[in-house]
Amino acid sequence: MIRFSVLGFKGGVGKSTIAFLLAKELARKYKVLLVDRDNVNTISNLFGIRDGLINALEEERPGSYMVTIGNLRVLNLTALFPRYLPSLERIVPEYKRVIGDADILITDNPPNLDEICELEFKAYRLATGEAHCNSVFVTTPGIALRLTLTHMNEVPKILRTWVPDLAYAKLTALVINMVKGEVGDIPVERKVIIPFKNDLFYSGLRIGTELVEIDQLVKYAEEAIENNNSGK
Ligand SMILES: Nc1ncnc2c1ncn2[C@@H]1O[C@H](COP(=O)(O)OP(=O)(O)OP(=O)(O)O)[C@@H](O)[C@H]1O
Ligand SMILES: [Mg+2]
């Protein structure tokens, strides 16, 4: 299987929107598990998920932290802030069960890679026996873009401190979201430009939201899937 991490160093740039739309599109062809790894719970709220896997483990009860719509499953890892985190030994069997036969796992992350991101990344390693990362960075133009270009190469280094035998950490694409006008030259090979959309901004994300520009990101993700399957 393959995993994609949707990342971005700033709040409100569209990480959850992009993670959701990418997952929805890939679910037309693949079995996708979309993991809400942000305590803000944008994606979980969209699907009406109130519970979290970590919360259920913490309270030692069965949980309802996942919904399934066709080939798309959505998992909420944490609802609000858990008081303490379960050990890796406790989370791994449950995570393995939840991942099941998914072809693709996509994580939607907070702006900072915190200890829950670390726990999830290590649990994924142990649950699947695999260790790699395909990053989709999301930014808006201006300062957020400069911040992203300066710091995105630090992420593989952080991941390697978590999982030292990481097979690879690649940039799938840089998404520059909410663009009004020109963005200028950006020294990144695979980028996706998404214009500012009034309806998305004022009405918010919905399950039915469509964005034609996501097709380019889906193409880059499918290239990553091919490379991953052929061991490139
Ligand atoms: N291209 C766009 N044009 C206009 N509005 C957008 C666009 N993309 C996302 N939005 C809106 O911007 C807001 C923030 O989006 P989103 O929640 O996806 O960002 P985020 O980076 O995940 O935020 P957070 O840091 O809180 O997790 C939402 O209201 C969303 O509907
Ligand atoms: Mg978000």
Image (cartoon, rainbow, N blue to C red):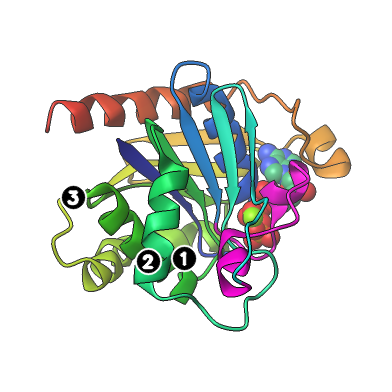
**Residue 16 shows in the view:** yes
Circle 1 packing at 10 Å, graded few (<14), some (14-19), many (20+), is some
Q: Are the residues flagged by discs 3 and 1 in contact, CB closer than 8 Å? A: no
Structural distance between the alpha carbons of marks 3 and 1:
23 Å
Q: Which residue is denoted by mark 2 in the rendering?
A: 151
Q: Secondary structure at mark 1?
A: helix
Residue at point 57%, 59% (across, down):
53
| Residue located 65% across and 56% down the image | 63
Residue tagged by mark 3? 168
**Which contiguous range is marked in magenta?**
37-59
Nearest to the observer: residue 17 or residue 67: 67
Q: Label 2: how many residues lie within 10 Å, few (<14), some (14-19) or many (20+)?
A: few
The residue type indicated by label 3 comes to Tyr
User: Which residue is labeled 1 in the image?
Assistant: 147
Q: Identify which residue is drawn at 34% across, 70% down.
A: 89
Q: Residue furthest top?
A: 29
Q: Nearer the viewer, mark 3 or mark 1?
A: 3
Q: In the picture, which quadrant includes the N terminus?
A: top left
